[in-house]
Amino acid sequence: MLNVIADAIVFSNLLALMALGITLTYMTVKVANFAHGDFATVGIYFVYTLFIVVGVSQYFLLPFAFLMGGLVASLSYFLVFKPLVNRGVGSVGLMIASIAMDMIIRSFLHIYSDIMQLETKKIFRGFIFQDFVFQIYNWTLPGILVVSTILSITLILSLHLLLTKTKMGIAMRAAIENPNLAEVLGVNVNLVYAISWFIAGGLAGIAGALLPFTMVSDPEIGWQILLRVFAASILGGLSSLYGAILGGYIVGFAETLGIYFLSKPPFNISTAYRPAISFMIIILCLLIIPEGIVSVKISLKMPWRRKQ
Amino acid sequence: MIDIIRLLVDIIAFYAIYLLLSISLNVEYGYAGIPNFGKALFFAAGGFVVGSLTSRLLAPLAGIDLHQVNFKIYNVLIATKVSQYLSGNILLALTAFIAMIILGAIMGGLLGVVASYPAIRLREDYLAITLLAAGELARIIARNYDPLICGTLGVSVPDPFAWLPGIQRSIVQAGIMMSIAVMVWLLVERIARSPFGRLLRAIREDERAAEVYGKNVASIRMRALLIGSSIAGLAGAIYAFYVGSVHADDYTPIRTFIVWVMVVLGGAGNNAGAALGSLVYVLSDRIIMQVKYYITVPFDINYLSYMAFGTLLILVLMYRPKGILPEKPSLTIDFSKVISRLREEAEASPEGSGG
């Protein structure tokens, strides 16, 4: 049971980091970005390649995953999404473009891993990262649990500080809230959006680089995780970063604990149904509370407001 | 020589399937403006109906008692037995084929009606994610719930054309598939030019304006999804018969995206565009399949073609957002003809208007 909870925490940490990114990109360009999972996969493969070349623990290579994920994300913003937005392409067009990005990146990674597998004689599909163990008294904690928790708390806190305390972050929020007004007030909206995409891609890259500690990874893993991340950000309302974090933890726990209990008697459901829980969350959430859990809070406040 | 005929037959058969799929997306997205990112789901509906029912329904006729054999393990054998039985009874074979594809279309249409519930309420991008998730949900259930299509093993489909020898069988089958596709094309083209088709476009352009004129937007959208999804279900059923087996993992979102590539590339709202888009895709895909064995590269060439299609899609969105063959204004009555006819009538009658 403790194992399951540890799994749930790790999975939720990663989902929350990725859901933050999807929400951030959705808030800037209004695109449901289907290529977001591939930013994570790029992080995985960059770290894995460096690991083979350099040979240090993957944990030390995480900053590179951040940089690489961010680079790919901001490049896709500059090369694809910004030109399309400037040409007035609607939300469906942007979504199709993001799927095209996904096809390009994913196929590139397939080709890359095929070639590398041949060149280096190492496994490039279906690999996992070797983890280490923390020993505290007679408790053994898996490294991924400690690292991912500390990392996601630090990243979320620093994003919060960036958005609320720095000039840059306030410019970001202003540009997201009202791009035209921000532009008039001297904010370089384009640069600010590019930075948002960089941060989003970087968070995905880090989350991705941690994925092989818990799951067998191949070029498809980003795509497989993507709909779960969408579940998290949709539950968070796709318009609130804090909602995305909350959504990440709810979806992560619902999936891990849900399948744990469902696979036991009296249900005896196969664990292969695990992703189905997230998909159900997406469908139910959109049909019942399409604005996400953030909207539930507001509707609960309503009676209190009327009293005043 | 045989090889080229086989390749041609294969291209025609796949072209028929993708033509149906792209027409169905064209009805939904091109005419009605509903972004259906769950095409794989409706395609799978037809496939699953054929896969799960054909053998089971025909087995008793072929003298197999389904209570005594394990369908999951022996489904290939049962399908072979049923095919043998059907090869001796052409009429039954064709009836079964037609009945099953109609059933597949009905199943797809039913799912389309269900999908209209979110389609009426949700914003475009939310609807896309919902349908995509629904498709993946269906795929996961089909893969793990054995009684449906035998889980991960997949189910084998009896061959309704087994009474024809060798290559003739494939030619006849591809011909039938292509003629079904052409019939559907003509039907959809007719729908698109009817008042209903213009109504669909009116709703796509401005929902509120259509509502002001007293049109029931919700019901029209439901009908568009019903038509589109039943075509997709039909395509799924035909595909299952052509491939001869149904595997859950054949219905991944990538199939949906390929259909989107075709429609966006060719031109949304124009069936000729959808046909061109699917022709480009099917030709390149099938030819790559053949060429693959003669070229030695250290990776799968398919991925290279996916990358090329992704780049092409982005370029089309940027530089030709209406596709290669853009939508044409809908054909209405030719007014010059009407005027000349009125004039003729006025000339014919001496008590014309002052003339």
Image (cartoon, rainbow, N blue to C red):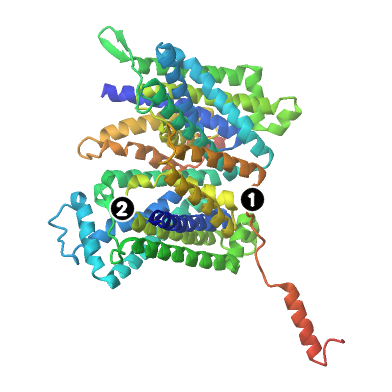
Q: Where is residue A213 in the image (x, y as percent from the top left)?
A: 36, 21
Observer-nearest of B22 and B207:
B22
| Image-based side of B59 in relation to A26, left or right | left
For residue B90, say whether it is visible: yes
Q: Position of residue A206 (x, y in %)?
A: 47, 21
What label does residue B47 carry, if any?
A: none
Chain to which mark 2 belongs:
B
Chain to which mark 1 belongs:
B
Observer-nearest of A10 and B276:
B276
| Mark 1 and mark 2: Cα distance apart in space | 37 Å
Q: Position of residue B151 (x, y in %)?
A: 27, 46
Identity of the residue drawn at 36% across and 57% down: B242
Residue bearing mark 2: B245
Residue type, mark 2 in image: Ser
| Image-based side of A201 in relation to B110, left or right | right
| Image-based side of B336 in relation to A284, left or right | right
Look at discs 1 and 2 and give the one toward the viewer: 2
Vertical arrangement, residue B190 with respect to residue A182, above or below: below
Q: Position of residue B175 (x, y in %)?
A: 42, 64
Residue bearing mark 1: B322
For residue A301, say whether it is visible: no
Observer-nearest of B114 and B169:
B169
Marks 2 and 1: in contact by CB < 8 Å?
A: no
Please tell me in which quadrant of the rendered image residue B231 appears.
bottom left
Q: Where does the N terminus of chain B fall, quadrant-wise?
A: bottom left
